[in-house]
Amino acid sequence: MWTSKLECCKNISGQLPSRQFVYRFVATFVTCCIVYQMTKINYFTKHALNYKTVTRLTESRNCINRTDITKSAYPRKALDPTSSTVVFTTSTDEKNTQKVVLKKIDAAKAKYVNKPTKSTIHVPDGKRSQQKEVKSTKAHVHVDQQAMSPGNNSLQRNKSPYKIDAQQVSGMVELVKRTSSFKANHTEYYNEPFEELPLQTKGIIILTQNRSGSTFLGEIFNHHPDVFYVFEPLGFFDFGQKRHADKVKVVQRNLKCDFPDIPSLYKTLDLHHRALKAHCIVNNFCFRTLIANLCGKEMCPFGNSACIGCGPVHLPRAKHMCRKKKVTVAKIVRLRDIRPFKLIAEDPTFDLKFIHLVRDPRGIESSRMKLDRRLNVKSNSMLTCGSQLRNGIASFANTTDTQWLQGRYYRIRYEDLAMDPFKYTEEIYKFAGLEFKQEIRNWIKLNTQHNPAHRSPWTTKRNSTSTMEAWRKHLPFSTVSLIQKNCAKALDLYGYKPVNNETQLHDFGVRLFDKV
């Protein structure tokens, strides 16, 4: 068959073209098709990104970053993400910017949202076919009322890398309205005056990485009556974001019990819409349900025992409570470098200490892989161990840039804390200047001798000794070898032993870390 079709391609000598010539012709044709398609994609991406930029600018000016809305003092209309008619109530300095933004939105939407598209439908009719042109227009986005509920985290998903999720934006606007309405219905509680105490002068940062056992260590402080514990004050930042200066300022305010208003903070930091967290907006405090001091009857008189339905945190009351404590403790996993915190340590009015929690990187990667099976172990382990190595070297405080850490730094391995939680908890409290109370001993006993069957990966209740090296059961030797190759220096610095074969990996009679 193919021979007959190639008869027309015979050259002057009457021979068919060579196989090499055919391959080259096909390759050239395919390359041209790819280049053509890439040109179309680049053209779309360029204009789609423009649409994304102007829409994000409008968001930040009109709805999400202006969540201090009250009907009496600030009568404004919220942004309708599907409409180009936006009512601004801003200062005269922004009028020119507003006009430009509106024009760009109208142009972008006219070109990409409401532009009619033609599709051809072939209707077979014997040997003939009919073609019909069907005009379709993108419908307005319907906002699901269920998605607006405060407990629904689906608002955090961004469905497209090129355009704003209108459902997310509308949902956040609704949350802002509900928060303002809750405050209006409980004016007596939110208007109660409090004596403004001096700022807190003692703080401790638990510096670690996610999936390192930091939740358990944090709970040791969360249950102490003399501590105001803050669970990840940087919760609205993405893990990949740098912005060290902004993060340090947020941490500093939390340690001094000068808690920022979350909606105002979003506006000040100009965060991407994907950083919006529904629970942060509703509670005016990120991870409120994980902070014991914010879930008691004093801070949550309207909610239940699970800290649900409490309404936004009354910040003057929270500041007053925090400043009466002996020390503030904040767990940080979104800023893994200890060096930027030098700014806080150099404050002569504030006594800052660090508890550096480290874990075997093989255990960290195993725990993360349970939550994300598509995790790139190679790049992730390199980042993890690079951070561990930098902080470990800085802790020696033997250079002019690190001398400020002398007397401020305490290192604890997760494995040591799991093996002997009572001994090392007592050491940690001594470093922090706290008393090891009996109720803390009871809590540790309850949470370190738990049956591991059917437990959640986020819980603090677990059998600490069985969890410590559980990664040896789950990771294949090839993955272990890859992590050991990327983390050789970090393993050596913290006293973790490498394995050379599967027999050593599964020999649980031998611990893979040195005794302190």
Image (cartoon, rainbow, N blue to C red):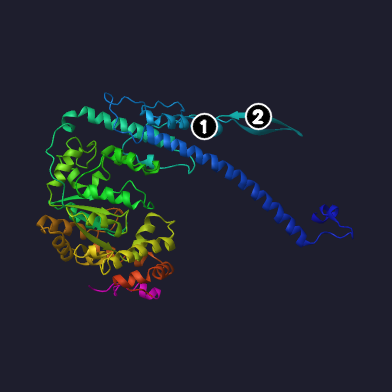
Disc 2 packing (10 Å; few <14; some 14–19; many ≥20): few
Secondary structure, mark 1, is helix
Query: Is 11 left or right of 502, judged from the image as shown?
Result: right
How far across and how far down the image is residue 137, in percent? 55, 29
Residue at the front extreme, as displayed: 93
Specify the quadrant that holds the C terminus. Answer: bottom left
Whole-angstrom CA distance, mark 2 to mark 1, is 23 Å
Residue 178 covered by magenta stretch: no
Question: Is 281 drawn above or below residue 440 in the view shown?
Answer: above
Q: What residue type is labelled 2?
A: Glu
* Residue 490 badge: none
Residue at the right extreme, as displayed: 13
Judge by depth and name the residue closer to the eye, 125 or 151: 151
> Mark 2 or 1 closer to N-term?
1
Residue labelled with disc 1: 109
Q: Which amino acid does label 1 sit on?
A: Lys
How far across and how far down the image is residue 329, in percent? 20, 53
Question: Is 51 drawn above or below residue 257 in the view shown?
Answer: above
Residue labelled with disc 2: 133
Judge by depth and name the residue closer to the eye, 57 or 114: 57
The magenta region covers: 500-516
- Of badges 2 and 1, nearer the viewer stands 1
